[in-house]
Image: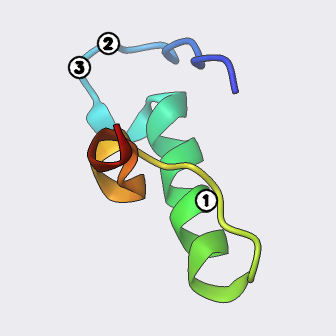
Amino acid sequence: MAQPKKQSSPRKTGLRRSHLRLELARRVNKTSPVKVRTTRKETGKALAK
């Protein structure tokens, strides 16, 4: 997934689209058998290398 752009005000962390995407991805990961990549630390990609 490409990195999302920021929305309107730069300082509100929760409104950044990447954060919205993360929130959704985590919600999907809780229920779905198909996992979505969230962050490098969470998905363990750094450990795999």
Relative to 42, is 25 on the left or the right? Answer: right
Dividing the picture into quadrants, the one containing residue 34 is bottom right
- 20 above or below 11? below
- 30 above or below 16? below
Residue drawn at (57%, 83%) of the image: 30
Dividing the picture into quadrants, the one containing residue 3 is top right
Residue closest to the eye, 6 or 26: 26
CA–CA distance in space, label 3 to label 2: 4 Å
- 33 above or below 10? below
Which residue does the numbered mark 2 point to in the structure image? 10
CA–CA distance in space, label 2 to label 1: 21 Å
Residue drawn at (40%, 44%) of the image: 45
Q: How many residues crowd around disc 2 within 10 Å: few (fewer than 14), some, or many (20 or more)? A: few
Q: Which mark is residue 2?
A: none
Residue drawn at (54%, 31%) of the image: 17
Residue closest to the eye, 14 or 35: 35
Residue closest to the eye, 26 or 47: 47
- Numbered disc 1: secondary structure: helix
Of pointers 3 and 1, the one earlier in the residue sequence: 3
Q: How many residues crowd around disc 1 within 10 Å: few (fewer than 14), some, or many (20 or more)? A: few
Of pointers 2 and 1, the one earlier in the residue sequence: 2
Q: Which mark is residue 11?
A: 3
Q: Are marks 3 and 2 in contact (CB under 8 Å)?
A: yes
Amino acid of disc 3: Arg
**Residue at the extreme front of the image, as rendered:** 49
- 34 above or below 22? below
